[in-house]
Image (cartoon, coloured by chain):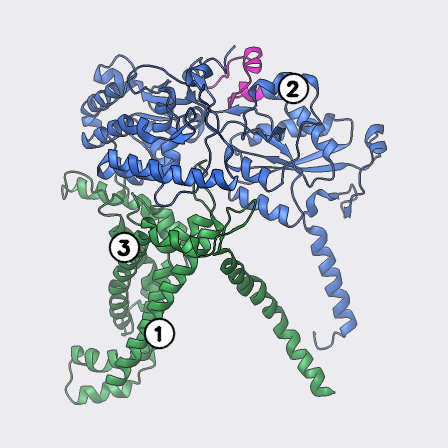
Amino acid sequence: MFNKMNKTSMLTVSTILALTLSACSSGGGNTTNSPKGTNETSPQSTNAAVNEGTSDAPKVKLNYWTEDRHDLAYIQEVVQRFNETNKNNIEVEVKGLSENYNQSVDIAFSSKQAPDIIRTTPSNFIPFVKKGYLEPLNGYMNAEMDAKFGGALIDKSNMMDGQIYSLPNYGYSSRLIYNVDLFEKAGIAGPPTTLDEMVETAKKLTEAGQDTGAYGFAINFKGADNSFEKAPRSIAELSGVGGYGYDFKTGKYDFSGFADIMTAFKQMKDDGSMLPGVEAMDIDPLRAQFAEGKIGMYLSISAETNVYLEQFPAKINWAAALPPTINGEIKGVAGYWKTGPWLSISSQTKHKEEAWQFLDYMYSDEVLQKYYEGGYGLSLLPDIIAKSKTPEVPGIEGFLPTENDGIWPISPKVTVDGTDFSNLFIKYTISGGDLDKMIEDVNARYNVALDKARASGDVTTEAMPDFDAKSMQGMLTK
Amino acid sequence: MTSLRKLGESYSFIIPSLIFTVVLGIYPILWAIRYMFYSYPGYGEEVFIGFGNFAALMRDEAYWNSVVNTAIYASGKIIITIPLSLVLAVILNKGLKGKNFLRAIYFMPTVLSTAVISIVFFNIFNSYNGIINQFLMKYHIVSKGIDWLGPDMAMFTSIIVAIWGAIGNYMLLFLAGLQSIPDDVYESASLDGANARQKFVYITVPMLGPVLQMIIMLAITISLKGYESIMVLTEGGPIGRTEVMYLYVYRMFFPISSSSTMIQQIGYGSAVGFMSAVIVGLITIGYFWISKRLNRIF
């Protein structure tokens, strides 16, 4: 058949195929499905068309990318409402990307197919700003928005060099989560408030759980950074110690505040109070074991409520409390997790005004209140919490913001030679060693990296001699 | 004129694959070679630091630990997989009943995704509710569950999983080699009174020489570069006990954790990748050299 086909017809078929394929590509928000069902390039929106607000005007299609899965159903619902109710012919399409989100955004930008609205997170905020992906929002915000969000903006998390790139919405509180039934069986009145109590409680819970194969404590060491952020960090921060080893007062790294915390973790491991296999355990298997009643307590975040409601329905009574502190004294705040930025506008979008109109809607009281009430995340805005009903999610009570919760300033990111601190401390917990020497070594390596980063201009954070972790108390409550 | 047109037609067939080779093969290598001399986290300024990344690499204990782990992982896998797959191939080359079914069973792991295999094995080996521990405890073989993925056993478990995944592939190559040995040779040996062991040692193994050489070379390069199974099974842990070279390289480009403490290091990652490629290359050249010498001796 191919032999018979002449060159002209082959060229024609190839051209049609190429055009069809290129028309099928996402095209950076410039293509849209017309009512006739054919893919056509949408004309550029004009202010006249937008202002007219007529249904005849061409639609402005915006792409919104997010890596969040837990709230996708709610987000789709509010986006649909926006699409149905906005008078400016704007249509937003949400795309949930669960894997390799940051790489997908990178590829989209380098191929000029960037989404118009981007979910930004604490881990990608600085890279995205430095890569020039995000549009500063200062020029779009009015006095009302300034007043609503001004107090919640965090440097290097919402802002860089005085420019606002993303406004906050929600975060997760850090808590000690415990098996109430096992506590009752062991005759323990309540959750521990000091490290010593935590070690003792873990031991008693393990004894009480012998007949059912339950252990006092667990931690997901497979994801070293993740487990470190959820457990030792929260204890350190509530005790007034920087959770990533950075001392905001001196502007240097000092991991010595972790000595007692890591000693307590090692003690629980040595006592046999930790669930066997924690070395290779990920967070989901840990949750599955907790739901089965095999774990007495662990440290995690407020996302656990929905996990025990939907993913691993809990067969036990459980509750959450503030993490313990080093010696019972609360000198700081339990740091929220995954806080700071939420939505941003792409610097490459051709529809910045329309994107801002959508952001204005997403950051409205109505959307934020229902987000909080739905239990998708704890609002970072005390005003929203005050106006909202308490989320109707079983177990949420223990996670609600208290005056001892807060958002710590952002620690500098540095590239360190050798093993990072989280892996080093986990190594100590599992196999021991000279902790003082380890701390001395990790301090030296991090400070060399910090000096280098400051010299190259990558890090601009300076010492804050007046910094007081206690002053953050009450920042999330009214 | 006609020959010119024919030449043009030939090139039109080559050009697409040439473009792919340049774009997806040569360009990324040149790109990585350039970044070996830069400090670059994937954004912002690229700072030229000469051999700075290599100097840091020499001091990087975690990397050299991963090189040692790779050597243990690869040798453990090769030493067990190759003889075992040879024995299996010899058995399944005989007129056994259901031999095709058995061949398919042994080959099955090769067509499964490494990630799926590793997840299944994670569930089999995990300490708290793994099938193996449950079995061992149920029949009182052990009183307490074995920490298969703990610091002492994780490498052993990773090797077991790797063997299971690779054995079918090598078995198939050996089967192809076995089928190329003429039956006359075995018949002559039988007439001379050779037993099964003698036939295996003096006929099968020597005549499989060229196939064996190729299989060993494949096994060396694949084992040294393998990391996918370990990434899913242990993420290189616990405490770096199963961290292998190419998993370390992968981490530099794509930090596995979304933690705020992780930073992409494209410059350093390129240097680590280059060093790892040099190590794999040197070992392969070493094997070729030994293999040639052995050819001359035997």
Camera-nearest residue between B165 and A276: A276
Which residue carries the number 3 mark?
B160
Camera-nearest residue between A247 and B190: A247
Classed neighbour count for the residue bearing mark 1: other residues with Cα under 10 Å, few (<14), some (14–19), many (≥20): few
Indicate whether residue A362 is drawn in magenta: no
Query: What x and y, as percent, mark residue A189?
Result: 26, 12
Amino acid residing under circle 3: Ile
> Which residues fall within the magenta stretch?
A369-394
Observer-side mark, 3 or 1, equals 1
Amino acid residing under circle 2: Asp
Contact, CB < 8 Å: mark 2 with mark 3? no
Indicate whether residue A372 is drawn in magenta: yes
Dot 2 falls on a residue whose secondary structure is helix
Camera-nearest residue between A151 and B237: A151
Dot 3 falls on a residue whose secondary structure is helix
Q: Please state, as top left, top right, bottom left or bottom right, where the N terminus of chain A lies in the image.
A: bottom right
